[in-house]
Image (spheres, rainbow, N blue to C red):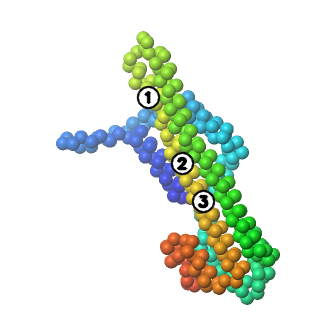
Amino acid sequence: MNVVYLIGIALALLFTLFGIIFNIGIHPGQSPMFTFSFSPDSLWNFVDLSSILIVVGGTLAVVIACYPKLAKSFPKHIKIMLRAQAFDPTIYVEQLVELAQIARKNGLLALEEKANEQTDPFFKQAIMLIVDANDPDRVRSILENDIEQTSARHQEVVAMYERGSNAAPAFGMIGTLIGLINMLKTLDGADMESLGPNMSVALITTFYGSFLAHVIFNPIAANLTARDEEEVLCRQIIVEGIMAIQSGENPKFLRERLMTFMNQKSREGGSGEDAQEGRRKKRGK
């Protein structure tokens, strides 16, 4: 579970509600310096059904119109975003080093059994390509093309949420303009004391649009981008590892080369036999 995302969204909601319900005043030179008031009824000032329909309905309509095939996959995207890190590069490095050791002792054909054990279809495909004795250039071309096409599909999904992030404030402004036009149309002979409440209703749609864009759509797009980067990194490691195995590279040198794909902290935690054994025990629990 992506706990950090949930904590961030919860804090955003909490601080927003705190700002609406609570009022803290600062009065330098006076005693008491701080004044604190609690008014839960203020929440009703931010509830307007018409504004919700304009912003939420309009934004979703634009997203569906721009991405009709992807819009039906909202639940799938949320599930991907909420899951914990599914692609751990250190685990792939270990597996590739193990495959290199097997290939060096028993040949490439001995890797077929390991390929059938893989749950990652890309990893399985990569192993089978060298087991079938394909040309190295062809193997690299097939795998790199797979990575590019997969990343392109992921970026299209991210673009859908970025479109929603751009559309939400726009519909917030549209709702505000609608409210202002209606208010000005009835201004002649109206009670001047009602101008304040009418103006606040007109501005609620701007609040909804900004909230929807920066608390809902933007975090989803950012998290899906991070998931794509994790998957691409692991697949690049697989490609380099598979090509090295096919060329008969030394397993120890292979480990050091694949570790260069990760940051320094991951390298320090992922190099050495003791660290490898510790990760195996952790996976076995």
Task: Name the residue at 43% across, 46% down.
Answer: 15
Q: Which residue is mark 1?
A: 200
Residue 214: where, in percent of width, then height?
50, 45
- How far across and down, in percent of the image, does residue 115 sit? 76, 74
What residue is at 51 percent from the left and 71 percent from the top? 263
Position in image of residue 224 (x %, y %): 59, 55
Q: Is 9 on the left or on the right of 134, as rendered? A: left
Q: For residue 117, which numbered disc appears in the image?
A: none
What is the spatial separation of the Cα atoms under label 3 and label 2, in whole angstroms?
14 Å
Q: Quadrant of residue 88?
A: bottom right
Depicted 190 relative to depicted 12: above or below: above
Q: Which residue is mark 2?
A: 218
As helix, strand or loop, the secondary structure at mark 1 comes to helix
Q: Give the mark, 3 or 2, whose residue is nearer the N terminus.
A: 2
Residue sticking out furthest to the top:
189
Mark 3–mark 1 Cα distance, whole angstroms, equals 40 Å
Give me the residue at 66% from left, 40% from top. Answer: 66
Q: Is residue 178 left or right of residue 241?
A: left
Residue type of the residue flagged with mark 2: Asn
Element on which disc 2 rests: helix
Q: Residue 227, labelled with which disc?
A: 3
Mark 1 crowdedness (10 Å alpha carbons): few <14, some 14-19, many ≥20: some
- Quarter containing the C terminus: bottom right
Determine whether the residue tagged by mark 3 lies in a helix, strand or loop.
Answer: helix
Q: Which residue sits furthest left? A: 29
Disc on the earlier residue, 3 or 1: 1
Residue 96 rendering spot, x and y as whole percentages: 67, 77
Q: Does residue 283 appear anywhere in the picture?
A: no
User: Toward the viewer: 260 or 63?
Assistant: 260
Amino acid found under the numbered disc labelled 1: Ser
